[in-house]
Image (cartoon, rainbow, N blue to C red):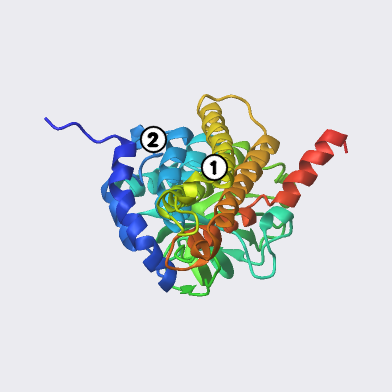
Amino acid sequence: MDAVPSIIDRVNLLAPGFAERAPLHDRAASFPVENFQELSEAGLLALPVPKALGGVGAGVREAARVVSAVGKADAATALVLAMHYIHHLVIAKSGRWPAHLSERVSRDAVNGLALINALRVEPDQGSPSRGGLPVTTAKRAADGWHITGRKIYSTGAPILKWYTVWAKTDEAETRVGLFLVPAGLPGTEIVETWDHLGLRASGSHDVVFDDVVIPLDNEIDVRRPGEWGPPDIAQSTIQAVLVGAVYDGVARAARDWLIDFLRTRTPSSLGAPLATLPRAQEIVGGIEAKLAVNARLLDTFARDIDEGIALTSVEANILKLTVTNNAVAAVEDALSLTSNHGLTRANPLERHYRDVLCGRVHTPQDDSTKIFAGRIALGI
């Protein structure tokens, strides 16, 4: 009897196809639907779903390994997958989701092509992490909640089956929080606004809700504004690892291309491969150092989450800052050795650079992380 392929073996079988299609989707800014069909058929969308609901029951550590391997092949696919995994891992750990909703989205991920992501950011509000109530409103009526508003940067919009929508209520005493909205309901429109420097295939378009009706029991976690305290630890720690894993994967792809370039590029003036130059060896060594730090941080932090070790959001934020900045620096180092070759669109390094820069814009951004950590250190 043939052995069942391991999780990482399944990813490694799919990755070459993802990598081959990545530049095509990047050029056209088209969404890689076929990648997610293959991930679904391989059982990888259900990776973090509990075994009791038909999933694999994997933890953060295994999810991060998958995301990094996919990120090495195609960053846009990895980001959408990471957002999906973050949701399912948080559902299993946070205890905030009503049981009937968590079971519904979990079984969907097992049974077909059903991805989920949060829709939080709005045109006028900016990042919700920096405060302020959303403009998107949930109005309570006899037939359900009526959702109206516009969300931007809705990663994975072309393929999502479920949205968790950040909205405020129209009640006498306003509440704010998350509502589970199935994609494709009447009044929902995806406006193709995503035209970005990096992650061009991520489908991070606007989603507009015009009086979209959902059941009253699709309320996930809605509270008075003052009841929203510090970030949920499960959310902040899991997100830090999986977002970091996306960009670490991109940096590893850049490293691999650079090494092949240095080994095979033999300028006539040198008469030997560029890999023989001490300067090249030093810079590659620096890249290896950054990636070694990333690997250790991601793996040990993910293991701590899985083992229930108490962590803090400050640690999580610092991990995200360190890993993403190391990834950016590694790709910049690669560019410093490749001259025009690294920036030509015929080679993947320029795409890796555009993609890895996006790591800096994910919440929490570097300034917020440093200010928060500084205030704690100073006792302010």
325, above or below 188, in the image: above
Secondary structure beneath dot 2 equals: loop
Number of residues whose C-alpha sits closer than 10 Å to that of mark 2, classed few (under 14), some (14–19) or many (20 or more): many
Secondary structure beneath dot 1 equals: helix
Residue at 57% x, 67% y: name it: 152
Residue at 63% x, 57% y: name it: 361
| Quadrant (top left/top right/bottom left/bottom right) for the C terminus | top right
32, above or below 189, in the image: above
Q: Position of residue 315 (x, y in %)?
A: 67, 35
Q: Is residue 265 visible?
A: yes
Q: Position of residue 325 (x, y in %)?
A: 63, 48
Task: Identify the amino acid type marked 1.
Answer: Gln
Q: CA distance from mark 1 to mark 2?
A: 45 Å
Task: Identify the amino acid type marked 2.
Answer: Pro
Q: Which mark is residue 61?
A: none
* Residue indicated by mark 2: 50
Residue at 41% x, 44% y: name it: 69
* Residue indicated by mark 1: 281
In the image shown, does 8 or 110 lie closer to the viewer? 8
Q: Is residue 55 visible?
A: no
Q: Is residue 195 left or right of residue 363?
A: left
